Amino acid sequence: MSEEIWQRVVPPVPEDPDVVVIGSGLAGLTAAAYLAANDRKVLVLEQYDVAGGCSQTFRRKKEWQFDVGLHYIGGVKTGEIGRILGGLGLDERIEFPELDPDGFDTFVFPDLEFKMPKGWDNYVGRLVETFPDEEEGLRAVTDVMRNAMEELRSVGIPDSNTDLQEYLEKAPTVVSWGMRPINELFDENFLSERSRAVILGNAGDYATPPSRTPVIMHAGVIDHYLQEGAFYVKGGGQEMAGHLVDLIHTYGGRVRTHAEVERILTEETESGAHRVSGVELAGGEVVNTGNVIATGDIKHLFLELLDEEAVPEEIRNTVEGYRMATPLFTVYLGLDFDITERMPATNYWLHSRYDQEAYYEPVAAGEFDTDPPVYISSASAKDPGHEGHAPPGCSTIELMTWATPDPAAWGVDEGEDAPKYSRQAGYLEAKQKVTDQLIDRAEKQLGELRSHILWEEAATPMTQTRYTLSSGGSSYGIEPATDQFGPLRLEYRTPVQGLILGGVSSRRGHGILGAMAGGVESASAVLGRSLRTEIAEGAVFGDPSSLTSGGEGWDALEACRKLQEKALRA
């Protein structure tokens, strides 16, 4: 790592870039980083003023720092995240403090507490210890999930080029169980409501009803953490984005903020298909390019950014029919005490009931849950040695739950003459009511909080849409359900020549792993070769010794903000 004092250097915008990436979340930044490291001229366009998407952090009063979406992560050593970072030479530049290996997730039910430990054997053993009368069923269920993930690691997700007979032979568990609802797996093995609820204790990581959750979805989530344990990113989620931005700039690419794409320009080919010719920004600026990786909201992409005649009717109908994943509501609190005195390095999942399907009924009805579940995360508990999260002796926590995206439920008047939603009295009242619900529930776990609050704010599904342009306020993209997940999603190469699909609604899905792995797949589609295979074989692209991130004076948030065209150039 460089010993020099870090100074931000912002290169000029490349003319007629080889590739334009729409969106600067981890999917877009990973794709752009791999392309830049493979000598492609890359331009990343971000409509907001900070790069990073849902991985970013934000600061208040220069004292408090909160994470938007990166709360814990797995696979950072020998797993896929570690390999992706290693392929760019970033694996030694980012530190990952480990959460409690005996309970990185703690599920609190009305009359039961379950700590999820690192390691499949430890996890299964604890399930059996908790529910000894269900040992046979629990072992059968976990064997299916564990075997399916081992098979997927070997053969991957099938696509249009897959030999299905060969795939069946190599991945029989994936074929037989992967896309079936996890409720069916539970039913076949006669699991009780209580043991089902414990297995699904962290299903908020994808927010899909168990009746529509593919076995492979939940298996993937828990396997991601069980393999090597769960970790946080030292300094906060913005660190990931900051290092990627630095790499893109070092190799001559450019991340540009305040650059909203209004249209993807196409031209008709002799065959009658369409191909990308450029993008038009808000304000009319045109950037010419033959390749676009679109990592933002999939409905926004196909139904708004592209001219109707450029999108095949079948694709348009498919995208219009997608259900968005359940959105989230988050409360951010700055507290005047050391949270480690009350909370270990774990995530608390406070469950108000065992019936996991019931959580989604109010959302579907456009209503609020009268007794919502609460997820508690604290950067101060996970990264206690870092001073940037809160003032000395203080701490931050985030409280999250599911929420309806229905504007009417939030008291929002969408009339033409109505004031901005965030200034409407009905909205503010609904927002405060849910905030108070979550704080009330958190106090039952952590003790008195209200008298210790120095900073309080909250984000709703409308907030998510404002900052990321996501449909329905969803941070997870389209719902990862049995009828629209994995191989049932659109392929990375779209029918529009030169347009590559990326982001959390692509085949690799959402979350830090899904976004970054999807970014690798998007870059592979542009390059016409499998970067995933090359990375697995140990390839490192670019020259890691030329990178400057992480040295003295390094500030990941500063590396990612104010990158509009008026920013300082090299």
Image: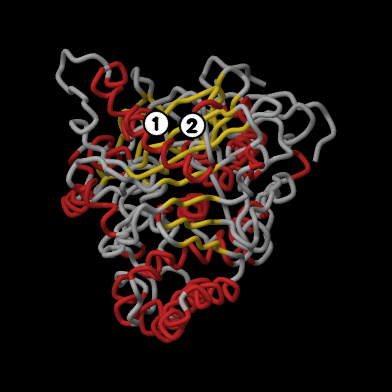
Q: Is residue 240 above or below residue 63?
A: below
Name the residue rendered at 55%, 61% in the picture.
115
Extreme-right residue of the structure: 3
- Looking at the figure, which quarter contains the N terminus? top right
Residue 423: horizontal and vertical position, in percent? 30, 16
Q: Is residue 53 left or right of residue 163?
A: right
Rendering quarter of residue 179: bottom left
Please report the residue visible at 53 percent of the width from the left and 39 percent of the height from the top.
447
Residue type (three-letter) at the residue carrying disc 1: Ala
How far apart, in angstroms, are the residues tagged by discs 1 and 2? 8 Å
Are there few (<14), some (14-19), or many (20+) residues within 10 Å of tag 2?
many
Q: Is residue 267 visible to us here?
A: no
Nearest the eye: 412 or 438: 438
Q: Nearer the viewer, mark 1 or mark 2?
A: 2
- As displayed, is residue 245 above or below residue 92? above
- What residue is shown at x 57% (from left), y 73% (from top)? 120
Q: Describe residue 516's horizontal placement relative to residue 459 as left or right.
A: right
Provide the residue designation for mark 2: 332
List x then y, in percent, for residue 137. 40, 82
Q: Nearer the viewer, residue 251 or 483?
A: 483
- Amino acid type for the residue under numbered disc 2: Tyr
Q: Secondary structure at mark 2?
A: strand
Where is residue 385 drawn, in percent x and y? 74, 39
Q: Position of residue 240 (x, y in %)?
A: 61, 41
- Closest to the observer, 71 or 510: 71
Q: What secondary structure is found at the residue carrying circle 1?
A: strand
Contact between labelled residues 2 and 1, with CB atoms less than 8 Å apart = yes
**Which residue carries the number 1 mark?**
459
Mark found first going from the N terminus, 1 or 2? 2
